[in-house]
Amino acid sequence: MKPLRLFGSIQLKLIIIYVLLILIAMQLIGVYFVNTVESSFTSNFTQSLNNRVDLLTQYVGQYMSGQTEREQGEERTSYDDLHDVVSNFNKISGAEVQVLDTSGVILVSSNPMLVGQKKTQPEIAQALQGFSYEERVIENGVRKLALAYSVKAGNRIIGAVYVTASMEEMYGTINSINQIFIAGTLIALGLTALLGILLSNTITNPIKEITRTAKAMAEGSFNQQVRVNGNDEIGQLGQAFNYMVNRLKEALSANEEEKDKLASILANMSDGVIATDDMGKIIVMNKRARQMLRLSEEAVGSEISSVLGMAKPEIDRHVLGAQHTVMIELGATEEEEDSVVRVTFTPIYRRERRISGTIIVLQDVTEQEKMERSRREFVANVSHELRTPLTTIKSYLEALQDGAIDEKELAHRFVGVASNETERMIRLVTDLLHLSRFDSKQTVVTREPTDIAAMLEEVADRFSFQLQQRRISIQVYAPKPLPPVPLDPDQIDQVLDNLVSNAIKYTPEDGTITLEATQVEGGQVEVAVQDTGVGIPKKDLQHIFERFYRVDKARSRNMGGTGLGLSIAREIVKAHNGFIYIESEVNKGTRVSFTLPLEVEGE
């Protein structure tokens, strides 16, 4: 927390304002009071001294004219008597008195050492001319009031009286009054400061509490309330603050709910979603987008152009242009195949119609593309498979029509070739009908408990003639006792026939084929057909169950294969709630295994 600067606190400002107001008021009152007291004291002192001097002048005039009378009015006074009057005046008023004659010689003085001296000061000359004199003077650092009055006898000036009275006592009284006033001012300032602290606390404490509460809210603690102690402006501010806190909590709660909903929607979307700012940097990316693009969470903040592998001008063209959709292909990894992603760019506009970002939706259309490609390949393969035998049959029939029918041996061979090609088309159509029934869920699986070991023995016996011709040995391994397996014997026989037929086709002479049936965990029986043939390349294993897929297309077609046997086998095993998988290594052999459950759900 930063230290408060001078005048950085409202409380300090209020206290200073209170103190300054009182100080200024006391100063104004003090100046007026001191000036008034000093003027009053000075006026009173001057007037009092003037009255006394005036009275003294009258007495001195009588003494100096020689006509002073006693009660009987006959005896005259002397200068000694005048000296007594002056001494009494000095004792009463504390003033120095000098009585001078018309030539300026001191006749009588409160200071006997000055008697007989002649004074020529301007104030004495002014008084001897009939003008009174009054002035404040400083003698030896002492402030005095000097008065000079002329002494008259009738209309004739016979002398002058010069009086100087010290004003220090008066100023001492004024200073005492000033000190009392200063002390009162200091006390008033102290009380004002204390009162200012108390009053300012009533204002600043609620503000401080609101400030603390606001800081706590800024740090994330929204369960805050301000105490309201009154209905004044501060109380109204506290009520407004509490109302704001409640509304803010409601708004944040609603925002969090919307944020959670949005996060849940983004997390569970099957499509990838990416949001970028106006500079093309990623600010939001859901989990699906990271999976599709094979990115980590650190991709947030990266350039979208580098993530999508597209140039920025091309992205801008899709964002701003009429065509907002583009297809991109993502390269394959060791675990995943190539994937095709449809990317849709949607600009985000602000109110002033300026683009502030882009929403990018990623849709994995790999399966759709595969299905479309499979459909095209399926149509092409069926057309090719049908066209080849039909072309052969047509050519041989044309040859027979051209006269080959008259040559018995040649005609017999041509009819045999046409018959074989017709059987091949029948097999192809039959296989296609099988697949069509499986695709439309029209195939009915009629299960019955079957001895799987006996079924393998029958298959081996059925292919024994072909095996002898190819000099291939066959082994059946089925440890007993195996429980009866609920299956459709005809369909499983078709699976075994396809697998054994493929093994015979691709196993060279002196090879070995093994038929195996074992019970495995999970209440299932695993059936395997293993050969020591040419094997299947690793790149072809993932496509081996696709329709019309052939590893060696020319050789497979020459052997009479349609490329649908393994596809039919997979559909039959799937209809029995089992799984089929293949393991192979080039020049070492192939093992095709499928599992069949011992118990069927619902039975």
Image (tube, grey):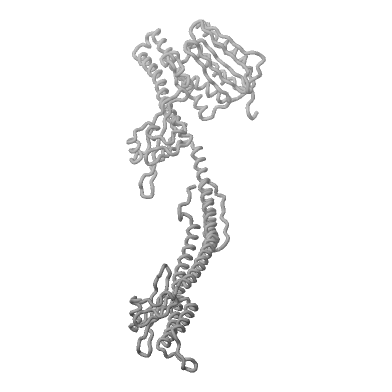
- In this rendering, position of residue 172 left or right of residue 455: left
Q: Is residue 309 above or below residue 399?
A: below
Task: Please identify the quarter of the rendering in which residue 357 is found.
Answer: top left
- Residue 273 location in percent, x, y? 44, 37
Answer with the quarter of the image where residue 456 lies.
top right
Q: Residue at x 58, y 21 (%)?
A: 595
Q: Relative to residue 70, is residue 298 depicted above or below? A: above
Compare residues 105 and 302 and report the one nearer the observer.
105
Residue 128 shows up from this direction: yes
Regarding residue 426, the answer to whether it shows in the image is no
The percent position of residue 516, horizontal first and vertical second, equals 59, 14
| Total numbered circles | 0
Q: Is residue 329 above or below residue 141?
A: above
Q: Name the image quarter holding residue 421.
A: top left
Image point 46% across, 74% down: which residue?
Answer: 37
Please indicate whether residue 603 sits to the left or right of residue 210 in the image. Answer: right
Q: x, y percentage for residue 112? A: 44, 76
Q: Position of residue 26 (x, y in %)?
A: 47, 68
> Is 43 rendered above or below residue 249?
below
User: Closest to the observer: 334 or 224?
Assistant: 224
Q: Quadrant of the C terminus?
A: top right
Q: Is residue 402 left or right of residue 341?
A: left
Between residue 66 and residue 581, name the one nearer to us.
66
